[in-house]
Every structure is written in structure tokens, then in C-alpha cells.
Amino acid sequence: MGNKTYYIKNATNIGVYKINDKDVYLIDTGNDKDCGKKIIKIVEQQGWSIKGIITTHSNADHIGGNKVIQDRTNCPVYALGIEKSFTQFPILEASFLYGGFPFKDIRNKFLLAKESVVTPIENNLPVGLEYLTLKGHFFDMIGVKTEDDVYFLADSLFSEETITKYHLFFVYDVREYLNTLDYLSTLKGKLFIPSHCQATEDITNLISINRNKINEISDKIYLMCLNEVTFEDVLKGIFDEYNLVMNPNQYVLVGSAIRSYLAYLYDEGKICFEFKENRMYWKHKQQG
């Protein structure tokens, strides 16, 4: 990949950047302590030491290895803005997704990572690394560009296989996600590594696939609002449309994403809401 840039293929790809002959920075740490231990073993086998962890965003499958690595190496963890708070206090993710205190079935490693001590990323990256803002999937998500002209793109893009299988992936801010896709189309680099995709030299097609799916889901939800519907009606409609299976994790993840789509359509002036008999109904906005 380059003189200094490597990555560990994983369910969540892990970036490794050498700042000198012996020391490396990690980009994300996977979904749990076992992944963290695996990373430590791989790095030590190369004769390297972990000097820092860059957190692209605070989803549990990106920070799950933080604690065990930080405990064993005493390295700092860096994150930006709201991601810093969520990484330091992971209960915020499960609470945010559910919209209240998370019931025990969603207090699991998929939605609730272990806490780590976090330092603001601003002005703290070593020479050869820079971060880029990639909002949309989560609050203050970032990507990382290395001196070798390699881009780690976090969850700004999902693979065609994932989209074909699950259709709906988590998006916090639909408008910002679309803006990020536009921004990604301007990047020039040697290699691009999304967190859940194969590394690629060209992300043009991947950008189109992600944008098309966002627009498809927006259109489906808009059509559902032709008649007055509640949030739960829309949620069921999406699960039925794509043959998804409801469980506690999917309920909160997909449910939160659906609320974001409704907010997007409302802010775009395409739908409106009304309260009747103590229920909130979404419907098409009357034109004129």
C-alpha cells in the first residue's frame, strides 16, 4: 500500500500507520476486546509498538478494542467532537439509538462498547496523517488520509454486497450523508479503504451504489406517506419491503435511521406531520 500505511482486513478494517521504524498509530480497533487482542498480537509480531488510536467514529464496531489496547499500551485515543463524548461514554450510543435508557437486550457489545479515555484529535495527529470530515453516517465521523496517499473512509461507503443483502444501512443525517458522497467524488488518491469494503483504487461506482440506495429508501418512505402513517407503520413497511427480520438491535438501528429519513423528508418540504388522538402521523405536504 505504501512505505508507511497498512491495514488489517477485518469485519471492520483496521488502519495501521508507521510514524517511525518502531511505532504505529491505529485507525479504529474493531468490535470487541478479542479484536483488540488480535490487533496487539499482529502489531507485536511485526516488532512495532502502538502509540495512538484514531477513532473515526464512536459506533461500537469501531471502538470495541479501544479499552484493552489502551489498558495494555497506555496509548492515547483520539476522536473528534461528539464522537469523543460517545467514545468516552459509550452508553450514549445505545441511549441515543433507543431514545431512552437502553433495555438490557440492547446493552450488548454490538451497541455498547467499553469506555476509553479520549483526547481531542485537533492538533494532535503525527506528521503524515490528516483527518477529513465525513458527516452523515454519524455525528462527527472522520476519515484519515496518510502520507502514502491512502484514504481510510470509515462508514462513508458500504459495499454492494452489504447493500444488496440488507438494503438499509444506518444514517444519522441523510442530507449530510449525500453531501459527503459528493465530497468523496472529488478525492484523488492511491487507495481507498472503507471500513466494511474491500480496498479499491476507484470508489466512483461505490459512491453511485450508496447514493442510489439512499434515494430509493427516501422515495419508498415518501410513497408510504401518501396516506397518513405513524413511525411504526413506516418501520414495519420498510422491514416488510426488504424482508428484514426484526430483533432488538435491528429495531433500534433501523428505527433510528427511519426517523432520520423522516426528518430529511420533512426538512426538504416533502412531508409534514399532524397529531390526532395523541398519535403522530406523517403525510404528504399539500402543495400550493
Image (spheres, rainbow, N blue to C red):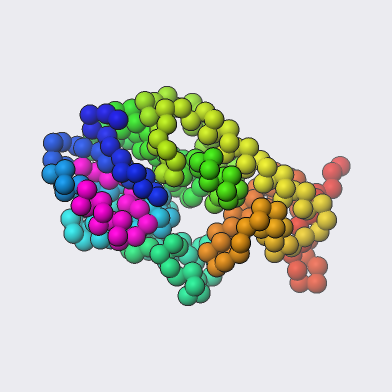
Residue 27 located within the stretch drawn in magenta:
yes
Choose between 170 and 41: the one closer to the eye: 41
Q: Is residue 169 left or right of residue 272?
A: left
Residue 24 is situated, as x and y percent measured from the top left of the image, at 20, 42
Q: Is residue 203 left or right of residue 219?
A: left
Q: Residue furthest bottom?
A: 104
Q: Judge whether residue 166 can be spotted in this image.
A: yes
Magenta-tinted stretch: 24-42
Choose between 126 and 247: the one closer to the eye: 247
Q: Relative to 132, is 31 above or below?
A: below
Residue 82 is situated, as x and y percent measured from the top left of the image, at 42, 53
Residue 117 is situated, as x and y percent measured from the top left of the image, at 28, 59
In the rendered image, the quadrant that contains the N terminus is: top left
Quarter occupied by residue 196: top left
Please tell me which residue is depicted at 31% across the width and 56% down the height of the picture.
Answer: 35
Q: Relative to 274, is 129 above or below?
A: above
Quarter occupied by residue 215: top right
Residue 45 is situated, as x and y percent measured from the top left of the image, at 16, 47
